[in-house]
Image (tube, grey):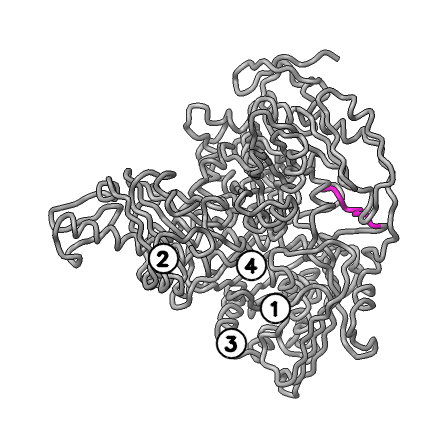
Amino acid sequence: MKRRDFFAVMGGGVVVMLVDDDLYAQETGGGRGGSRQAPRDLSAWLHIGETGIVTVYSGKVEVGQNARTSLTQAVAEELRAPVASIRMVMADTDLTPYDNGTVGSQTTPQMWPVIRRAAAAARETLVDLASQKWMVERASIQVADGRVTAGDRSAGFGELTNGQKLTRTIPASVALAPAAEWKVAGTSVPKVNGREIVTGAHKYTYDTKLPEMLYGKVLHPASFGATLVSLDSASAEAMPGVKVVRDGDFVGVTAPDPFTAEKAVAALQAEWKPVVAEASSKDVYSYFKKNSRDPTADDGGLTAYTVAYIAHVPLEPRSALAQWKDDALTVWTGSQRPFGVRSELAQHFSVPEERVRVIVPDTGSGYGGKHNGEAAYEAARLAKATGRPVKRNWTREEEMTWAYFRPGGLIEVGGKLNPDGTLAEWEFHNYNSGPSALQTPYDVPRKKEQMHQTKTPLRQGSYRGLAGTANHFVRESYMDELAYSAGIDPLEFRLKNTRNERLRAVIQAAAGRFGWKDRKKTAGHGFGISGGFEKGSYVANCAEVSVVDGTVKVVRVVEAFECGAVVNPEHLKNQVEGAVAMGIGGAIFEQIDFADNKIVTNRLARYRVPRFADMPVIESVLLDRKDIPSAGAGETPIMGLAPAIGNAIFDATGQRLRTLPMAPGKLATGTAPVPAAGE
Amino acid sequence: MARVTELDVNGTRLRIDADPDRTLLSVLRDDLDLTGTKYGCGEGQCSACTVLIDGMPTKSCLTKVSTVAGKRVVTIEGLAPAGTLHPVQEAFLEADAMQCGWCTPGMILGAVGLLRHTPHPSEADIVSSLNGHICRCGTYSRVVEAVQMAAKKGGRA
């Protein structure tokens, strides 16, 4: 939206825009004020309408982590407006400032302070208005509960903005109140759109409709990389209302209803020419090493761990609704990167970005799995070919085959201890999992830590915690191996090897709540501990498992988590618990099996995810550091779970499981428990 | 088989014109715009599509629309018809038993069905009765808590 359009869209009132400091200097000094166009120079903007309703615009997406609520809290805190008077407009590329995506746990560290600054500036603008209107000193004016007051005069926000068309541009560096003084931020404000969720009223992308809309389906190749040899579409085209769209290897159908669309795509007779598979899930780990340019020697004395490809399984599969009008494209789609999808679509269809609008309704989860615009592209292509709006809802099988996966990986690790149990050497090589959290947080004088680029046989991408989970699994499992080899208690061993106070604090908090020092070994039960940090936050886990006839059950998990000043304790607790629940899948049983360029585990009947019966008792300990800026919490809480479980399995059985998942079938039965280290 | 022309949904008889082989899920979502009922897997593995049929929680993705003619279908939209939330809906809000919310309508209807025949379920009852429901965000322990809260308040449908 262009700045001059603000009031046309929203009516009168006050608009506050936050711009980068450099641009602010240009605007105030260079006389360009008011002419620059959104979005790339603006980091946020906020409107206070004549009714007192506050509307805030952010390019972030709500994917379930409650960004909508936390950003609302930011506004309520600084503007001193009731939560109920605040509307967040999110993830609409025509209305909201440019944003690089709801990824990497960045909403809280990056967007949250920006929104707070815009709200703080808006509050000061209201004070200015009141000061002018009432002819009183600014210092005599208070703002609280959505009202501005000076002595016996008082006005609601709407009364002050009524009749105004005022825009104010402010620098992004405007100052903020410290966390210790927060009144709304830092409290458990309930999910702002919770009622729409429990009544089924919220419209996700999957639920959106337009008049005259057609339903689209796409014919996928029989296997990855296969090319289309021939297509017989006669029987599909004979169905009433069906149109077959073919463009090279792209084959899709549209129909007036989804039932006919399904029948039509099933009626297509296609012949595909397959390509030879380079690897399967059985031999992919040697494939990684073979295809690396700088592999380690096979006899280098390192210990190998492996990490399987896994699927995100967002419960709302990919979906898009596309509409072309006068060579301009509007797409509703559930993506974590609306502006990225806009660029993708602009490129695909050779139109300027200004003619593509991407709108993301609050989405049925992503976990890093919805960065791209696959469904958006398909819907837009079919809509262009038919001249009608087209809805493209992916099936679960499509989501589990044609999306992308968390990378599999091979990780080799080695280390040596000094006689006093401190680390002397550390070596760590990661093939394909990724570089996040590659570096050890422990103090070690000589270390080599390397990421090895290689090839991937499957399409891979981001995932909650991504490589942080793989790297923590290996590092914290191997730390356990070293602790046991030296006969040192795993908790004591970790504390002995790090001076990082924040890491020590979470490890001690988790161990304290768990009762680590008083734990009592019983047959078939074991205890494990882990710790780490990533993306500005710190995590430690203690786990208790039982192993009966080779079957692992996680009995109890304590997670201590610290991400600076806590924004919303209840929602943070929910994130931590959810990460533990989800993490159990990747730790114990989730694994994508693939062979012959096909996904074998392509349905939920073949791909097990955690369920109610898998849940341990989960206890979270939140360390609220009001002296440290808030960091994100969507990812780091998942990273330490797998090694805590693996270490507990070792404690119970004496078997070290060096694979993710640590599938139950890999445990030999009848192994006598080994005594806990230090006993 | 004859086309299905009438469906009793949320206490109202609605005119439809549906191929008998279509799923109840599709008719609810695509014909009647009752999109609170969610697709999650299409094979009965996740229970996001749960509705009540004559009071029993049922996976609408595996239910052909022809089999429910003459039966009472209740969807999430029918749980708070006058705007007053059902005790189970209240409890889900109170326990913050959701993140992205995609599984929530199915979970709530599953819980309503459970409380109908087991007004005071144990934790084990709740786990075994809802184990077919997937919450990928992992709010399971909060869902259990919500069902217990609703039971205390007398959450019978």
Above or below A508: residue B41:
above
Cα distance in 3D space between marks 2 and 4: 34 Å
Image coords of residue B11 (percent x, y) = 52, 17
Which of disc 3 and disc 1 is earlier in sequence? 1
Q: Earlier in the sequence, mark 4 or mark 3?
A: 4
Q: Callout 1: few (<14), some (14-19), or many (20+) C-alpha neighbours within 10 Å?
A: many
Q: Quadrant of residue A239?
A: top right
Q: CA distance from mark 4 to mark 3?
A: 23 Å
Q: Is residue A464 above or below residue A351?
A: below
Name the residue tied to disc 4. Answer: A104
Please rate how many residues cluster around mark 4, counting C-alpha atoms within 10 Å: few if below 14, some from 14 to 19, many from 20: some
List the residue tagged with mark 1: A437
In the displayed structure, does residue A66 sit left or right of residue A207?
A: left
At label 3, counting other C-alpha atoms closer than 10 Å, the crowd grade (few under 14, some 14-19, many 20 or more) is few
Q: Establish whether labels 1 and 3 are both on one chain.
A: yes
| Residue type for callout 3 | Asn
Q: Which mark is residue A500?
A: 3
Q: Which residue is mark 2?
A: A32
Magenta residue span: A597-604
Left or right of A225 on screen, residue A462: left
Closer mark to the observer between disc 4 and disc 3: 4
Q: Earlier in the sequence, mark 1 or mark 4?
A: 4
